Amino acid sequence: MKKQTILFAIALLFVLIARSQQVFLDKVSIDYVKTVAVWPLMKEIEPEWFEQSKDHMPKETVSYFNFTSDGNKSLYKRTKEAEVPRGMWFQPFADNNLVYNDYTTGTTISQKPVFEETYLIKDSLIHIKWKMTADTRIIAGFECRKAVGILFDTVAIFAFYTDEIMISGGPEGINGLPGMILGVGIPRLHTTWFATKVEATDVNSKAVVPATKGKNTTRNNMLGSLDKALKEWEEWGQKMILAFVI
């Protein structure tokens, strides 16, 4: 019994030492890869048309983004657009979003180009109802815990976050977990975002600033405008709306 107590104490000591040496980050630069599974997306929208046209579409598109934070604010923007092979049809949507979040005030300023209009959304951070799970995975060298979220009461999201990065943010406007989100999937959009590189860096706060150009609006007003503009597009229109407002 005494031997077991000693072994337990030694094991506990190693855990405490490991925790004391753990580095927690708040100033970071994170590269993300966004992947859209084009074939499942188009098949879900219009099955018959998809079967006739699928050979003229890429199976998926991949674009690249960067998230930079000084610990209190963050800026998320595209660094490389998706490449669509010559002769194939598919125009990625919501790939030009420029998202600025202020985690101290709980606000966002997001520039969203939509067709001929550019919106500048000034609003509170998106609210997502999260539920933690016991699942974990390693992303970009960090152990991440899985959470499942509900957005706008009906849209399911799964996310993987690490509490080693002390920012309650993620790609696009996704936020609200007790650490940085390094992986996200939205099944309704057949889209995933995963971090490929995380760098601790001395971020200049003056570089983390919001866009200023665009039609000033709120998230709800933009939703209303897009709903009217894309009403005739039915399922395709609804997916585009969701992609533009997250």
Image (cartoon, rainbow, N blue to C red):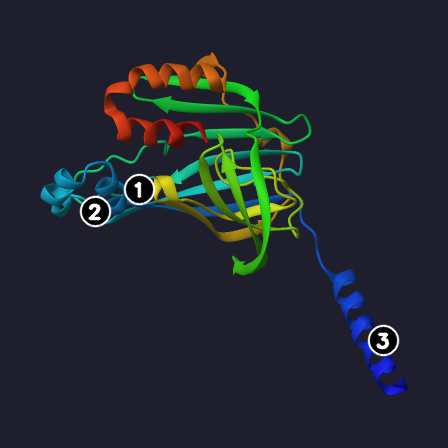
Residue 29 lies in what quarter of the image?
top right
Q: Position of residue 56 (x, y in %)?
A: 13, 44
Question: The disc labelled 1 sits on which kind of residue?
Answer: Ala
Q: Secondary structure at mark 2?
A: loop
Q: Is residue 91 above or below residue 4?
A: above
Of the image marks 3 and 1, the number of the one nearer the N terminus: 3
Does 19 sit left or right of 132 as displayed?
A: right
Q: Position of residue 13 (x, y in %)?
A: 82, 71
Residue for badge 1: 82
Q: Is residue 142 above or below residue 234?
A: below
The residue positioned 21% from the left and 47% from the top of the image is 58
How packed mark 1 is, by other alpha carbons closer than 10 Å (few <14, some 14-19, many 20 or more), is some
Question: The disc labelled 3 sits on which kind of residue?
Answer: Ala
Residue for badge 3: 9
| Labels 3 & 1 near each other (Cβ < 8 A) | no
Q: Secondary structure at mark 1?
A: loop
Residue 233 lies in what quarter of the image?
top left
Q: Nearer the viewer, mark 2 or mark 1?
A: 2
Q: Nearer the viewer, residue 118 or 39?
A: 39
Residue for badge 2: 58
